[in-house]
Amino acid sequence: MMFIRRQIADRRQPLSGRAGRGFALLSAIFLLVVISSLGLFAVTLTSSQNQSQVLDVLGSRAYQAARAGIEWAAYSAMQNAASSSAVWAGCTSSGSLTGLSGVLAPFTVSLSCSASSAVEGTTTIWVYNLSATAIVTGTLPGSANYVERVISFKMGM
């Protein structure tokens, strides 16, 4: 009987032995997985914030490129109005603005124009509907760095 009581007493003590070591390993693996998941989340968040910042800068530059196209078209139309009472020749077809430099160099600016006229007394007044579309050269809708800005402008002279 003494022998049986000793075996029962021996069965109660292994919590501090092998079973305790297995629990520590399980806890270590769990903590490793949790910390790795947090690290992955931080890297993903940082990456998406950087991409968002790049697109924001590209969007601002695309707006400036489109605005440069509108200003060029308006200037050209005003130069024509000062010298002729006919429609501006640049408004008969769509075109593009070339020669942008600096941070606007990667953009393609497409221009479109439509004109209508009205006669007041002996004066012909031309109304131009100008539109400029700026996109990053070589990108397609849906690609990572695709940005497009459109500016429309109506002027009469």
Image: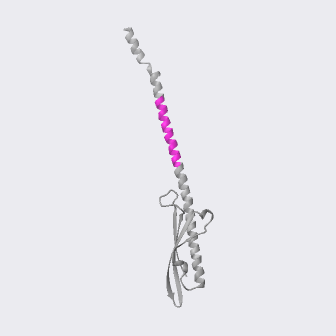
| Quarter holding residue 89 | bottom right
Q: Classify 4 as above or below 51.
A: above
Q: Residue furthest right?
A: 102
Q: Nearer the viewer, residue 32 or 2?
A: 32
Q: Nearer the viewer, residue 143 or 50?
A: 143
Q: Which residues are magenta?
A: 25-45
Q: Please, what is the dominant secondary structure of the magenta stretch?
A: helix
The chosen color scheme is: one colour
Residue 53, given in percent of the width and then of the height, sits at: 55, 55
Q: Residue furthest front?
A: 138
Q: Classify 2 as above or below 71.
A: above
Residue 4, given in percent of the width and then of the height, sits at: 37, 11
Residue 51, given in percent of the width and then of the height, sits at: 53, 54
Q: Nearer the viewer, residue 19 or 55?
A: 55
Residue 24, given in percent of the width and then of the height, sits at: 48, 28
Image quarter in which the C terminus is found: bottom right
For residue 119: magenta? no
For residue 41: magenta? yes
Image quarter in which the N terminus is found: top left
Residue found at x 51% / y 80%: 127
Q: Residue furthest top?
A: 1
Residue found at x 46% / y 25%: 20
Residue found at x 52% / y 58%: 145
Q: Residue furthest left?
A: 1
